[in-house]
Image (spheres, rainbow, N blue to C red):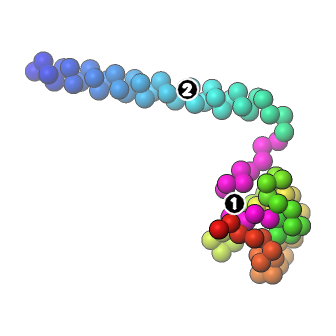
Amino acid sequence: MKKLIVLFSATLFLIACANNKQPKQVDKKDSTAMQSEVPQSIDVRFVDNTKDPSCGMPVTAGISDTVSYKGKRYGFCSKECKANFLKNPEQLVAAAELKK
Ligand SMILES: [Zn+2]
């Protein structure tokens, strides 16, 4: 019976530790959000193309909009480029230069 109590308190301790980690992550997120005044852009890692298919700009310059097309995620520098892509995706998809 003693063993069971020890195990139980150990489990509680582990749960408490896991809970303690969560607020720390939120704090970190908040501080980085406060540091950057630039509007949040979409991370390059989340898109499959290396170039904006509409204007040819590298996605590393900044992505403000994305679209999913045939299972791939394409990033665009602006909403205008996204709109332009959606007018003729079949042709522009070749210019997107997908990551390998
Ligand atoms: Zn563009």
Indicate the position of residue 51 as horizontal and vertical percent values. Answer: 80, 65
Q: Which comes sooner in the sequence, label 1 or label 2?
A: 2
The N terminus lies in quadrant = top left
In the orientation shown, which residue stands out farthest toward the bottom? 91
Q: Any mark on residue 23, and which?
A: 2
The amino acid type of the residue labelled 2 equals: Pro
Q: Is residue 93 left or right of residue 6?
A: right
Residues at marks 1 and 2 touching, judged by CB atoms closer than 8 Å: no
From the viewer's side, name the closer residue of 51 and 37. Answer: 51
Q: Is mark 1 within 8 Å of ligand 1?
A: no
- Give the SS element for disc 1: loop
Q: Is residue 56 left or right of residue 90?
A: right
The residue depicted at 72 percent of the width and 31 percent of the height is 32
In the orientation shown, which residue stands out farthest toward the front? 100
Indicate the position of residue 20 as horizontal and vertical percent values. Answer: 47, 24
The C terminus lies in quadrant = bottom right
Residue 71 is drawn in which quadrant?
Answer: bottom right
Residue corresponding to mark 1: 47
The residue depicted at 41 percent of the width and 24 percent of the height is 17
- Give the SS element for disc 2: helix
Rate crowding at label 2 as few (under 14), some (14 to 19) or many (20 or more) other CA atoms within 10 Å. Answer: few
Residue 66, compared with residue 25, is above or below; it is below
Rate crowding at label 1 as few (under 14), some (14 to 19) or many (20 or more) other CA atoms within 10 Å. Answer: many
The amino acid type of the residue labelled 1 equals: Val
Indicate the position of residue 19 as horizontal and vertical percent values. Answer: 45, 27
The residue depicted at 12 percent of the width and 18 percent of the height is 2
| Chief secondary structure of the magenta portion | loop
Q: Which residues are magenta?
A: 39-51
The residue depicted at 40 percent of the width and 23 percent of the height is 16
Give the total number of marks visible in the rendering: 2
